Amino acid sequence: MSGEPQHHDTGYGRQTFIVMLLTGGVILLHRFAVPTGVDPTAMLALGFLILASYTIGNLVGVIQVPHITGYLAAGLLFGPSAAQYIGQVLPFPPFEEGILNNEVLESLRVFDTLAVALIALTAGGELKIESLRRGLRVILGVLTGQLATMFLFVGGLVWLLSGPIPAIAVTELADVGTLGALGLGL
């Protein structure tokens, strides 16, 4: 604490500008691309999503959230599920149907396994063994509570469906009994 102001060049404005520049580039490429025999949409979407999600992942790091959250948010934002909402605000290609529309997703199906592996690797990289050791008792308590709750609810549901309330009884479960219901709860 020398009393001098500390200046940190975070570059978050630059990263936001990069996402906006990438979005503009995709719009221009869709609008002014020369038609060829090959449809470059899938590779264009993949490249855009990799760069945009990396940048968005860095931006969410500002609020102390793991980068993987930004990657998932980018997939949600640019995927087909959000296209109906974004298409109303930006009603021109490729946003009216989503950058990752169903056709593009089908073309990129090859990368699914790789993407899941990278997500798992990234999530595993965020874990710290020392933190897990310190929280092991809490983690085991939560898991035990979830297991017991699931066991009781599923067992109770099977028991209820086996006949105590005739209106909701399933005849195939009538001979199960209480122990059988608890066994099915496992």
Image: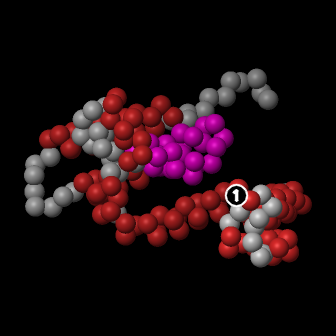
Q: Main secondary structure of the magenta part?
A: helix
Q: How many marks?
A: 1
Q: Residue at x 30, y 57 (%)?
A: 104
Question: Going by the image, does 10 lie left or right of 98?
Answer: right
The quadrant of the image that shows the N terminus is top right
Q: Residue at x 51, y 34 (%)?
A: 12
Q: Which residues are magenta?
A: 52-78
Residues 82 and 172: in front is 172
The quadrant of the image that shows the C terminus is bottom right
Q: Residue at x 42, y 41 (%)?
A: 82
Percent from the top left, x then y, of residue 24? 29, 36
Question: Going by the image, does 67 lie left or right of 50?
Answer: right
How many neighbours does mark 1 have within 10 angstroms: few (below 14), some (14-19), or many (20 or more)? few
Residue 18 in sight from this viewpoint: no
Question: Would you name the residue on which mark 1 appears?
Answer: 168
Percent from the top left, x then y, of residue 168? 70, 58
Residues 150 and 86: in front is 150
Q: Residue at x 56, y 35 (%)?
A: 10
Q: Secondary structure at mark 1?
A: helix
Residue 88 occupies quadrant: top left
Percent from the top left, x then y, of residue 14? 44, 34
Residue 131 occupies quadrant: bottom right
Kind of residue at badge 1: Ile
Question: Going by the image, does 37 lie left or right of 149?
Answer: left
